[in-house]
Amino acid sequence: MVLNYRAIVKLSGIIIVILACLMLPSLLVSWLFGESDAVRSFLFTIVPMLVAGSIITLSVRADFNHLKIRDGYAIVALCWTLGSALGAVPFFISGYIPNFADAFFETVSGFTTTGSTILPDIEALPKGLLFWRSFTHWIGGMGIIVFAIALLPMLGISGQRIAKAETTGPVFGKLTPRLTESSKILYTIYIVMTVLQVSFLLMGGMSLYDALIHTFGSVGTGGFSNYGASIMHYDSLYFEMVITAFMLLAGMNFTLYYYLLRGDWRELFSDSELKGYYTIFGSAVLLIALNLWQSGNYDTVGESLRYSLFQSASVMTTTGFASADFDLWPSFSKMILFFLMFVGGCSSSTAGGIKVVRILLLFKLLKRGLAIRLHPRAVISIKINEKPIPADTVSAVANFVFLYFAIFFVGTLLLSLENFDLVTTASAVASCLGNVGPGFNLVGPMLNFSLFSDASTFMLAIIMLIGRLELFTIMLLFTRQFWNPDR
C-alpha cells in the first residue's frame, strides 16, 4: 500500500470537526449583529461538518505510529485543500459570493494568509462572514495541522512527519523533545501577541470588532480588512505604527521568542536571519522614502517615511495591508516592493515568500563560488549563525529557489492567456505564490482579483496553497514517484 489511507481519512475527519468548531465564533458574531442570513449559512455548514467529521473520526480505526513521510505530505495537502473548500461553504450558500470558484479563492486566500480578494465591495458582506474571512488568517497563520497537534496530543499522532510537511523554512526543528509541547508553546506566544495587539488598537479608539479583524490580519500576516480602503480608512498614524510593529514581529522566527522567554538574549542578537531581515527592511524603507520625497508624492520627508515604513513592512511580511495606493508610486519604489514580495519574512514565521534565510544562503553560496574561482583547492563551508550548513540543506535551498521561480514563470505564462497586461499578470502570480495579497495595476491595493476567469481563479488558489506549503508538499503529489508503491 502506497499510503496509510486510514490515518489520512481519520485525521481529515478530525480536521473537519476542528474546523466546524472554529466557525462557532463567527456564528456568534452573526447572531450578536442580528444577521439571520449569515447565521443560517453557518448553521447549515457547521452541523453537517460536525456530524460527518464525528462519524469519520469515530468509525475509522487508524495507526498513527507508522506514518511515512509521504503520508505526512498527503495529509497536509488534503487537509489544507479540504479545509479551504469547506471554509468556503458559508460564503457560497449565503449568496454573498455566489460563484464557488470565487468563494474557494477567498477562503484559500484567508487560510494561506495571502489576503488577495475577489470582492469588489467588501463592506457589503455581513459582519459575521467578514469575521470568518479574517479569522481564517489567524487559523492559517500558525498552521491548521500544527493547531490540531497542539490540541489533540492524546491521539498519539506521529506529528513530526505531518508538521515537517507544513513547516515554513529550510530546516525543521522542535523547541522541546515533544512536538505537542512545542506546538503549545508557539500557540501561547501567538495568542499573547494577538491579545497585545488588540489591546493597543483598543487604546487608540478602534472598536473591538475592528481591532480583532485587523489583529488577525497582522499576526497572521494575512491582510484582510473589513474596509475596501484597508488601513487608509482610518488615516491614523497611531494605528499604522501599531500594525507595522506587529507585522514585523509576526514576520520574525517564532522560535526566537521562545529563547527570549528563557532569557537567552544572545540567540536574538546573534541570529543572522534576523539581522538580514531588518537590514533588507530598513534599506527598503529608506530607498522608498527618498524616492517618494524626491518624486513629490509627499510634501515632507516625514510623510514619505510614514508610508514607506508601513508599506515596506506590509509587503515584506506578506501581510498586504495598504495605508496608501502604492500603485500610484514611482516605478523605482514599486520595483523595490516587487522585490520584497519574493524575499518575504523569516523562516518559522507566519510570513510567506522565499524567506530571508534562503536569500542569505544563496548569497553565501555565490560568495563561495567566487572564492573557489580564485582558490580552486580551498575548502569553504557555508555558515549561518557560525554553524556549518550541511551540503544537502544548501542543495535543497537551491532547488527550492529554482522551483519557486519556475512556478512563477509557468504561472505567469498560463495567466497571460487572460490577455491582461504583463504587470498585472506577473504581480498577480508573484503575490499569490508569495502569499502577499495585492499586486499592481489591475490587481493593485484598491482593486481586486475578480477580473479573472474561473479557471484562472482556481489556478491562482492552487498557487497560493503551493506557496503556503513550501512548494514541495503540493508539487510532490504530481510526481510519479510519490504514487509508486515500490519507492
Image: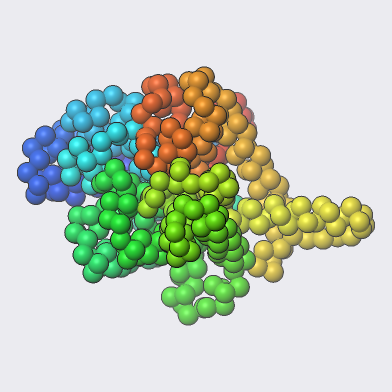
Instruction: Give left or right: position of 381 versus 374.
Output: left
365 to the left or right of 321 = right
The residue positioned 30% from the left and 61% from the top of the image is: 236
For residue 381, say whether it is visible.
yes
- Res 173 seen here: no
The picture places residue 379, in percent across and down from the top left corner, at 86, 60
Q: Residue at x 23, y 43 (%)?
A: 130
Which quarter of the image is occupied by the C terminus?
A: top right
**325 sits left or right of 58 in the view:** right
- Residue beneath the point at 32% across and 66% down: 238
User: 280 or 137: which is nearer to us?
Assistant: 280
Which residue occupies the foreground of this view, 334 or 352? 334
Asked if 250 appears above or below 86 in the picture, the reply is: below
Task: Left or right? Give the position of 311 relative to 188.
Answer: right
Q: What residue is at 70 percent from the left and 59 percent from the top?
A: 389
Between 437 and 229, the one nearer to me in the picture: 229
Q: Nearer the viewer, residue 68 or 286?
A: 286
